[in-house]
Amino acid sequence: MELITFGESMVLFNPGSKGPLRYVNNFYKTIAGAESNVAIGLARLGHEVGWFSKLGDDEFGRYIKATIRGEGVDVSRVRTDPQNNTGLIFKERFAHVNPNVYYYRKNSAAANITPEDLDEEYIKTAKILHLTGITPALSQSARETVFRAIQIAKDNGVLVSFDPNIRLKLWSVNEARPVLLKIAESADVIFPGIDEGKILLGMEKPEEIAKAFIDMGCKIIAIKLGKEGCYVANKDQGEYVAGYPVDEVEDTVGAGDGYAAGFLSGILRNLSLSECAQYANGVGAMATLVSGDMEGLPTYLQLLEFIGKTEHIDR
């Protein structure tokens, strides 16, 4: 297994029309979840990936599992929780702005994940363990599970990848900061945005944010700068890598997960830091072209064509 990740995935209901949800009568159903987005993104790019979580013993849980499995991701370690439901999320859309999101995930099956749900032998098979800051925000047991997974990875030479992914609808800044910084200290690769640099470190300049994380022990820092691209660094170098222009953005949700998937694909392919960043910027940009969290994530050939590494043949 090249990469393993875990965390909550929910059934996403996208409105069929814009405006307040009280006036929306039709929705279309898909899935949402930062970790499963990364897993699906990497699977489409040609990698062997596993994702696990806890899902309710309900039709929504079965739908999530079948959808992720259908994308070529291994879901053999997913647990079913007969006592708690699968989480839900609704989007609310207005013209020319990012959608509002409403979570229905309190006491969900995924929030009740525990360290006992981890398969240590499974995690050992991975080259990379990818985590986000969403999972430790769900519950104390989920937080303990994250730290136990990190320990397993560290004990077995598995690279730890971490996207802080701060969700202030789930916890406060004061609660999040010490937990996320503790995870960051164990991360080999980290994907902060500028806003997360401000929250976690009180810093806004990419170079300062990167240096702070390097001083903590992180080996690679990839700072997301939106349409401008990213700033990437390790202890020996740092550089800005330009993004790819998108004329009409449909939905920015999932772009950060796509960025992480692209960068991690570069790492797994032993590419240079700047090439990893090009992959990341490309996947992140392509994710914004389509409505939905993971629907716009490209195949490897589509990515290469988008970033100009190979020629597109139309007919």
Image (tube, helix red, strand yellow):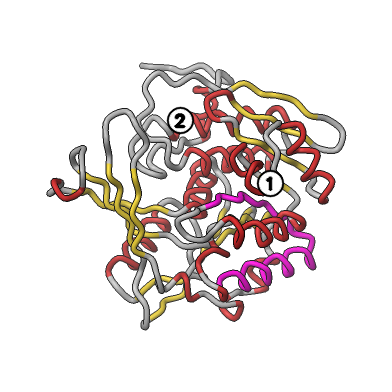
Instruction: Note whether 154 is above or below 33 in the view shown.
Output: below
Where is residue 271, by image quadrant?
A: top right
Q: Position of residue 265 (x, y in %)?
A: 62, 41
Q: Position of residue 274 (x, y in %)?
A: 71, 27
Instruction: Note whether 111 is above or below 192 in the view shown.
Output: below
Quarter that holds the N terminus: bottom right
Q: Position of residue 60 (x, y in %)?
A: 30, 65
- At a point 34% along the width and 40% down the height, the residue shown is 99
Quarter that holds the C terminus: top left
Q: Amino acid at mark 2?
A: Met
- At a point 50% along the width and 53% down the height, the residue shown is 167
- At a point 81% along the width and 44% down the height, the residue shown is 214
- At a point 35% along the width and 32% down the height, the residue shown is 97
User: Viewer-proximal residue, 52 or 186?
Assistant: 186
In the image: residue 191, left or right of residue 298: right
Q: Residue furthest right?
A: 236
Q: Which residue is mark 1?
A: 190
**In the image, residue 266 lies in the stretch drawn in magenta:** no
In the image: residue 51, left or right of residue 59: right
Q: Amino acid at mark 1?
A: Ile
Secondary structure of the residue carrying numbered label 2: helix
- Give the number of the disc on residue 224: none
**In the image, residue 164 lies in the stretch drawn in magenta:** yes
In the image: residue 11, left or right of residue 225: left
- Give the number of the disc on residue 286: 2
User: Viewer-proximal residue, 252 or 298?
Assistant: 252
Q: Position of residue 117 (x, y in %)?
A: 56, 77
Q: Which residues are magenta?
A: 142-166
